[in-house]
Amino acid sequence: MPKRTFRVDLSDAGIRLDVFLSHRIKELTRSQLQKKMGLNLAKVCGIPRKSSFRLSEEDLIEFDFEFPEKASLLPENIPLKILYEDDHVIVLEKPSGVVVHPGAGRRSETLVNALLYHFPGIGKVGPAERPGIVHRLDKETSGLMVVARSEKAHSELQRQFKQRMVEKIYLGLVWGKISKQKGTISWAVGRHVKHGERMSVKTKKPRSAETHFGVVRRYQGYTYLEIKPVTGRTHQIRVHFAASGHPIVGDSRYGKRKVKKSCSRLFLHANHLGFFHPESHERMDFLSPLPDDLEKFLERLL
């Protein structure tokens, strides 16, 4: 039986064993890991430990399990809303509720499965598990994405994202009144000190994060914003506004509130995307209007 070993560093000291392993073993979900740990398959410094065991710095973790080989991703005839396409890139609108690429516990009904059906050649671009993907949107977030159709485009777009040359602007509705017309949130973001499956400004391993915003309109109890993230940390926008006391409306993970006028989903939409074409180097900008369901929610606030 193959064995995987891990050494705990200071930044992970104090977190649960199952949380630690779930961040490193993507083949299994956290619940599947917990079941395997019940069979004494996880040892810390040579001693079998339960999933709730708290780790210390320099602990040596051994996990014995026969990992199944990953099945090839299957193309699926899922409709795509394409705004632009050529031999190098695809620009599309991702609807809310769609996962971008397969992960633990999900191998189908993702954006990647749809891309493989409509653009079969994309399966050879980039990593096998996320072909063509150079950036992501959360499952609940709707809006614009660019996808690479060639290795050159994949490499060049990744460079642009890394060097912060890509412009991304979101429309979001937050709870409460923000009095400033413009502002910047620059709290570092990382894994939560206790709940490792969540991101937070309370973290032992902070990574710089910066989000600009401007007020579009104020409603009774809400503020409608234009949001521009400078960095691209996981859940950055949602974490930043939740930590500021103004969580995104409809955010069940970071800012759930019970009110009469509830939004059916996360009120966050990527409405502007700008980048340089990887072949021609021409500046390309795309706009996506606010979806009907979010527009109708705003109308209810008048």
Image (tube, rainbow, N blue to C red):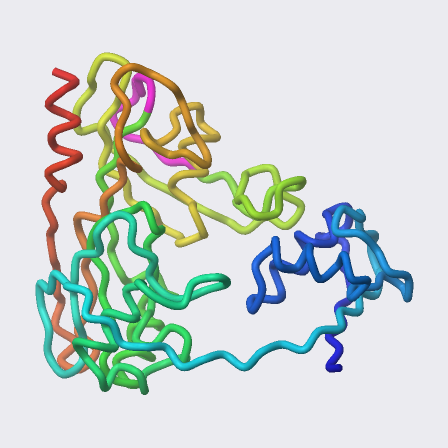
Where is residue 164, by image quadrant? bottom left
Decide whether residue 157 is among the magenta residues.
Answer: no
Residue 79 locus on image (x, y percent) = 15, 63
Which residue: 73% across, 48% down? 16
Q: In which quarter of the image is the C terminus?
A: top left
Horizontal side of 201 relative to 110 (left or right) equals: right
Which residue: 32% across, 77% down? 74
Q: How many marks?
A: 0
Horizontal side of 211 relative to 219 (left or right) equals: right
Which residue: 49% across, 79% down? 70
Residue 87 against residue 46 in the figure, above or below: below
Which residue: 13% across, 80% down? 280
Residue 300 locus on image (x, y percent) = 14, 20
Comparing 187 with 249, the one in front is 249
Residue 217 against residue 51 in the figure, above or below: above
Residue 267 locus on image (x, y percent) = 26, 35
Decide whether residue 178 is among the magenta residues.
Answer: yes
Most extreme residue toward the top is 220
Horizontal side of 240 relative to 152 (left or right) equals: right
Residue 105 locus on image (x, y percent) = 48, 61
Residue 214 against residue 135 in the figure, above or below: above
Task: Tell me which segment is drawn in magenta.
Answer: 175-185
Most extreme residue toward the right is 46
Where is residue 22, by image quadrant? bottom right
Q: In which quarter of the image is the N terminus?
A: bottom right
Horizontal side of 235 relative to 94 (left or right) equals: right
